[in-house]
């Protein structure tokens, strides 16, 4: 598997769509395992850090091998997307769970506000799909910053742009997402 | 949802937007003015900048963090039964909820006034309410279930159950006060309102240590034990149902209510299967819909304990989905509590550790072993493999606290001996050293094993031999494992016996190691008070070495010293002397060779010889030897070696004898300090030192301090020694002596009787201690006025002395007791001959000599005072002036000795002074009659003062002491 990942990443880098198709499930699976472990959310959990999560997946999949910086960027981009997928799925599950609870208890105000956060995340995901067709680079940025929890510096490195551009594009993405959400 | 910008338009806008966004945020809106030329672009930009970004605030956090928060807010929103709420104004919504509740429950309204809603959750809503009563205001919690309506049948069952629950009365259970069915058929409960915090947050907020947490858990165990005995199962034990009040008292709420709810659900078939499982707080049988028993509570408590101790819930780490967790729970144990945090990679500055006042390693070490076992036993998926009762659980937790073996641990030898060592750690002295080799791999014993290694290296045994010993000991280990040899319980004694056999059977080919081991084993038996076994082993060890053509000098010397000590204790003094001489010669030769430096063993040989010299009465030489030992230990550089404590103890005892009380006290305290530091307080020698300190303080008449030390000594001994161990005798004797001196006669009698009982049980043979105890019991009986009983005890004492062939000197020390009894019986001439015998046979500088002289003087004084008395006349000696002068001489002499041997403030010195003064007074009265001399005013004053001083001591209200004071009062009054 690990052998393959490096190869796949470099194939993705060359624009091989098929490589992307096999790479995403691999990373997704690994991340989901790690995330699930951390997010067995009937449990209370000490705060965990997303970067740790992604890096853990990276180490598991790629090992300590040195990757081409391009391959590395691809990895993180895919991982961020996978995280998005995982977290959205998770939010949806969670919502179902909550709805399931309602037959037993009238949801309290607090629960409603929690619900609304989950809903917000789900609607952000929907807005991102809108944004995808307009500017996929911005989506990538949001995935890295928000879903994978990377900081500006890390994001800049992976997207191969300046930190300043990261900040500027972040503004743009937010403005566009806000518009999508308000309509 | 749409952005409403085409891709091509976006490309156009973007260039301008980038330009604008490059500006500081505050200037951006002004900056776009420059694009006013292109109105549509301008508007687009303006609109984008004006977008309400507030709904995207959460983008600024990491998505995962949101989930973390979300989980926390759900957690904190669990049912808050009885949780105190801030006294805030009610919101409209809340008010209307109350109105609704009151309307729905009109029958509630008569009895209770609802104050506010305090929580809601899976089962329904909880209200805080006031009990409407004339006499007092009482807060209650009302729980109204929202599960639906009940059938007629259920209502009946419900009422029956509720009565059962209402009978539960326990300090750790919130009482169910009332309950019923509302007019719309909804069940409700009224419970005691508890001002408390859920146990998990209570523990964390107060940063409770693991032990403190366990103590809270014990309170839960008590509550459940009580409930189970009343046939009630809680079924819903979770942190939110365990409240801790501000005084730290645990109160369980919602007792048994889950059962009522479950039954409700059974009736409402449509809802079956819809139940949301919360594996975090459910037992496998609940998940599998199997019968619920008291063992269910055991499991649930196990889950809570797991969480409270580790900071994480059991099974939390094992799988993602609820279904998976449920499956795992029903088949597998959770991850061991001790390793869970490591396993899931909690970072070391997590609040988990902080709130338990421990580092990750400390927490791990605390949980490892017993606590792991206790929790995992509680969390057994199989009902029958859990604790059979709360009592069983409780006794394991208590055993953990007391370092006794717990039932949940397999009775492996390793475990048993570890426990034994931990409990008796310092108590077994060299046993520790010995077993350390067995368990060289256990870290706690590492230091000890290093000592052994060092000792072996010193004795010129090759290093691989040390390894051989370790391996060999491991073999004993295995052989003693109950799983292999079929033993249920291994005792230290069995271990030692097995060790001995193995040493003999299997080490014949390695005689040096064999001798070394036998010597060690002999030392252990000695420290255990097993003199005979110790002697036998050491003799074996010596014999083996004698057969060697080239024995190892160092080991041989060590064996000789130890065997000598055994001999000293079995009174074979001359044999001991020979062994010590040889041992010291060997040590000296090694030193002369220059091969060896000064060693602790060399000092030990000196100490052993010093003890012998002391026993032989050669205090001067003994003192020098102790001093040499102390110097040697100092030179070796181990000022805090346990042998230093031994030497100081010996030195102090000689100093006490010489009347150097302050020096003795200082050395004794130092010995105790060193011993406690090096070997801890749970050690037999430590108790002996403590009691020696007590004896010293008793002789200084500092009884309050003495009491503390003797009591402590006795207490430690009871902890570390088996019943009826001969060591108990010493502190008991001290305690008896202290009580006697304080005039608490019956208490004193009890202590002495206890000591006697101990002596009779621990040894079938007569012994010196037994004679001493008879003497003490005689004294107490005498003071109690039971003179015949006293006589009986004294006769027993004499019989024992005869039986053990005690020398004349020893018996003579007791004659003053017989004399005093005779005096009290009015047998004056008998008393006189006892005193005369004592004075003749005792060495003329000892304390018993002084006491006998003082007693004789008092007898003369008494006789002189009662001269006209018929008693005096019937005795065949008369008190003359000459007799009085002789008495005065004696009392002066006695006083000189007492001043040397006792602190100046001692009551015996005062007694001698008083006797002297009274004798003076008598003489002067006679002289006055003859020569009309003025009485000595100074003398009278001194008599009065001493009289007053002694009257304050309660022991002077009894027996012969009282006789003296009565006499003094008569004379003073004259």
Image (tube, coloured by chain):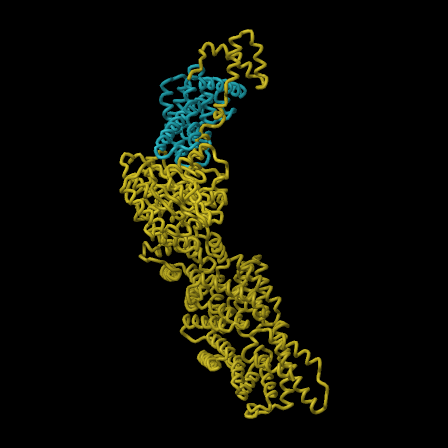
Chain colours: A cyan, B yellow
Q: Residue B565 in the image: x percent, y percent?
A: 49, 68
Image quadrant assignment for residue B549: bottom left
Q: Please state which of residues A3 and B823 is positioned toward the viewer in this rendering.
A: B823
Q: Quadrant of the C terminus of chain B?
A: bottom right
Image quadrant assignment for residue B262: top left
Residue occupying the point 62% across, 69% down = B660
| Residue A164 in the image: above or below residue B161 | above
Query: Can residue B335 be seen at all in this image of the molecule?
Result: yes
Image position of B182 (left or right of B666): left
Q: Residue B724 in the image: x percent, y percent?
A: 42, 67
Q: Please state which of residues B226 and B464 is positioned toward the viewer in this rendering.
A: B226
| Residue B45 in the image: above or below residue B632 | above
Q: Quadrant of the N terminus of chain B?
A: top left
Q: Residue B810 in the image: x percent, y percent?
A: 51, 79
Q: Residue B445 in the image: x percent, y percent?
A: 46, 53
| Residue B93 in the image: above or below residue B235 | above
């Amino acid at each position: 598997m690990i052998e393959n990942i490096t190869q796949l990443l470099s194939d993705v880098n060359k624009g091989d769509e098929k490589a992307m198709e096999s790479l995403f499930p691999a990373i997704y699976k690994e991340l989901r395992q790690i995330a699930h472990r951390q997010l067995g959310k009937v449990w209370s959990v000490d705060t965990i850090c997303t970067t740790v999560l992604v890096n853990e997946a990276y180490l598991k999949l790629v090992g300590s091998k040195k990757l081409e910086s391009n391959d590395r960027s691809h990895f993180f981009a895919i991982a961020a997307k996978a995280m998005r997928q995982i977290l959205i799925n998770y939010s949806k599950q969670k919502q179902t769970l909550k709805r399931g609870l309602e037959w037993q208890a009238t949801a309290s105000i607090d629960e409603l506000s929690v619900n609304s956060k989950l809903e917000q995340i789900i609607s952000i995901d929907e807005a991102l799909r809108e944004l995808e067709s307009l500017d996929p680079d911005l989506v990538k940025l949001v995935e890295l910053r928000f879903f994978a929890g990377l900081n500006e510096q890390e994001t800049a490195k992976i997207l191969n742009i300046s930190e300043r551009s990261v900040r500027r594009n972040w503004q743009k993405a937010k403005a566009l997402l806000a518009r999508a959400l308000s309509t | 949802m749409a952005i409403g910008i085409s891709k091509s338009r976006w490309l156009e806008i973007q260039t301008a937007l980038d330009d604008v966004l490059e500006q500081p945020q505050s200037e951006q809106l002004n900056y776009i003015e420059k694009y006013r030329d292109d109105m549509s672009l301008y508007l687009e930009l303006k609109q984008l900048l004006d977008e309400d970004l507030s709904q995207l605030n959460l983008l600024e956090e990491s998505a995962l963090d949101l989930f973390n928060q979300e989980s926390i807010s759900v957690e904190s929103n669990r049912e808050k039964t009885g949780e105190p709420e801030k006294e805030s104004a009610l919101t409209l919504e809340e008010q209307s909820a109350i109105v609704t509740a009151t309307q729905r429950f009109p029958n509630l309204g008569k009895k209770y006034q609802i104050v506010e809603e305090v929580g809601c959750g899976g089962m329904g809503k909880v209200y805080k309410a006031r009990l409407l009563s004339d006499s007092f205001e009482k807060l209650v919690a009302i729980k109204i279930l929202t599960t639906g309506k009940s059938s007629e049948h259920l209502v009946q069952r419900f009422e029956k159950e509720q009565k059962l629950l209402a009978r539960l009365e326990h300090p750790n259970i919130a009482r169910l006060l009332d309950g019923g069915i509302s007019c719309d058929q909804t069940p409700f409960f009224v419970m005691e309102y508890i001002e408390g915090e859920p146990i998990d947050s209570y523990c964390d907020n107060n940063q409770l240590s693991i032990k403190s947490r366990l103590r809270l858990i014990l309170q839960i165990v008590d509550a459940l034990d009580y409930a189970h005995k009343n046939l009630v199962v809680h079924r819903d034990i979770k942190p939110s149902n365990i409240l801790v009040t501000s005084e730290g008292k645990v109160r369980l709420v919602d007792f048994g209510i889950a059962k009522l709810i479950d039954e409700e659900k059974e009736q409402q078939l449509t809802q079956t299967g819809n139940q949301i499982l919360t594996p975090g707080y459910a037992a496998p049988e609940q998940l599998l819909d199997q019968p619920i028993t008291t063992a269910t509570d055991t499991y649930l408590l196990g889950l809570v304990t797991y969480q409270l101790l580790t900071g994480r819930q059991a099974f939390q780490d094992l799988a993602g989905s609820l279904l998976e967790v449920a499956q795992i729970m029903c088949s597998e144990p959770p991850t061991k509590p001790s390793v869970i945090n490591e396993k899931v990679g909690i970072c070391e500055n997590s609040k988990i550790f902080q709130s338990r006042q421990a580092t990750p390693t400390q927490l791990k070490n605390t949980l490892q072993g017993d606590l792991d076992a206790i929790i995992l036993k509680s969390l057994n998926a199989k009902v029958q493999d859990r604790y059979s009762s709360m009592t069983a659980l409780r006794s394991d937790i208590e055993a953990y606290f007391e370092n006794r073996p717990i039932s949940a641990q397999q009775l492996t030898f390793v475990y048993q001996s570890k426990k034994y060592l931990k409990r008796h750690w310092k108590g077994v002295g060299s046993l520790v050293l010995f077993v350390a080799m067995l368990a060289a791999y256990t870290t706690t014993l590492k230091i000890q094993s290093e000592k052994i290694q060092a000792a072996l290296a010193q004795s010129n045994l090759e290093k691989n031999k040390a390894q051989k010993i370790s391996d060999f000991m491991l073999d004993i280990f295995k052989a003693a494992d109950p799983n292999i040899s079929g033993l249920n319980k291994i005792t230290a004694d069995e271990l030692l016996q097995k060790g001995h056999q193995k040493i003999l059977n299997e080490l014949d080919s390695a005689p040096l190691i064999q001798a070394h081991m036998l010597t060690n084993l002999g030392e252990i038996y000695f420290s255990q008070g097993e003199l005979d076994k110790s002697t036998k082993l050491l003799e074996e060890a010596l014999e083996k070495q004698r057969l060697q053509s080239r024995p190892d000098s160092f080991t041989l010397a060590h064996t000789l010293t130890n065997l000598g000590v055994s001999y000293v204790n079995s009174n074979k003094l001359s044999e001991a002397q020979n062994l010590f001489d040889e041992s010291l010669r060997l040590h000296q030769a090694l030193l002369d060779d220059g091969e060896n430096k000064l060693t602790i063993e060399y000092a030990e040989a000196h100490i052993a010889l010093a003890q012998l010299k002391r026993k032989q009465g050669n205090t001067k030489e003994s003192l020098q030897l102790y001093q040499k030992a102390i110097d040697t230990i100092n030179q070796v550089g181990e000022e805090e070696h346990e042998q230093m404590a031994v030497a100081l103890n010996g030195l102090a005892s000689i100093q006490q004898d010489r009347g150097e009380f302050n020096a003795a006290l200082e050395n004794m305290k130092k010995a105790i300090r060193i011993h406690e530091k090096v070997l801890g307080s749970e050690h037999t020698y430590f108790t002996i030192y403590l009691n020696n300190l007590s004896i010293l303080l008793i002789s200084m008449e500092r009884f309050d301090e003495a009491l503390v030390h003797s009591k402590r000594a006795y207490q430690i001994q009871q902890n570390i020694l088996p019943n009826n161990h001969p060591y108990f005798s010493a502190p008991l004797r001290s305690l008896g002596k202290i009580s006697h001196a304080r005039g608490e006669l019956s208490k004193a009698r009890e202590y002495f009787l206890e000591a006697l009982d101990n002596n009779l049980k621990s040894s079938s043979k007569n012994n010196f201690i037994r004679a001493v105890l008879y003497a003490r019991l005689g004294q107490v009986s005498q003071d109690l006025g039971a003179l015949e009983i006293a006589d009986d005890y004294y006769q027993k004492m004499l019989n024992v002395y005869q039986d053990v062939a005690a020398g004349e000197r020893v018996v003579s020390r007791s004659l003053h007791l017989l004399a005093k009894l005779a005096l009290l019986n009015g047998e004056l001439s008998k008393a006189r001959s006892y005193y005369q015998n004592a004075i003749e046979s005792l060495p003329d500088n000892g304390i018993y000599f002084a006491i006998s002289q003082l007693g004789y003087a008092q007898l003369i004084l008494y006789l002189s005072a009662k001269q006209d008395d018929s008693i005096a006349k019937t005795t065949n000696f008369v008190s003359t002036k000459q007799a009085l002068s002789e008495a005065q001489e004696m009392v002066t002499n006695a006083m000189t000795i007492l001043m040397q041997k006792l602190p100046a403030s001692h009551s015996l010195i005062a007694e001698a002074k008083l006797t002297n003064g009274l004798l003076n007074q008598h003489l002067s009265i006679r002289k006055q009659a003859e020569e009309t001399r003025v009485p000595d005013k100074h003398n009278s004053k001194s008599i009065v003062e001493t009289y007053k001083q002694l009257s304050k001591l309660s022991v002077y209200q009894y027996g012969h002491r009282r006789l003296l004071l009565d006499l003094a009062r008569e004379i003073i009054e004259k």
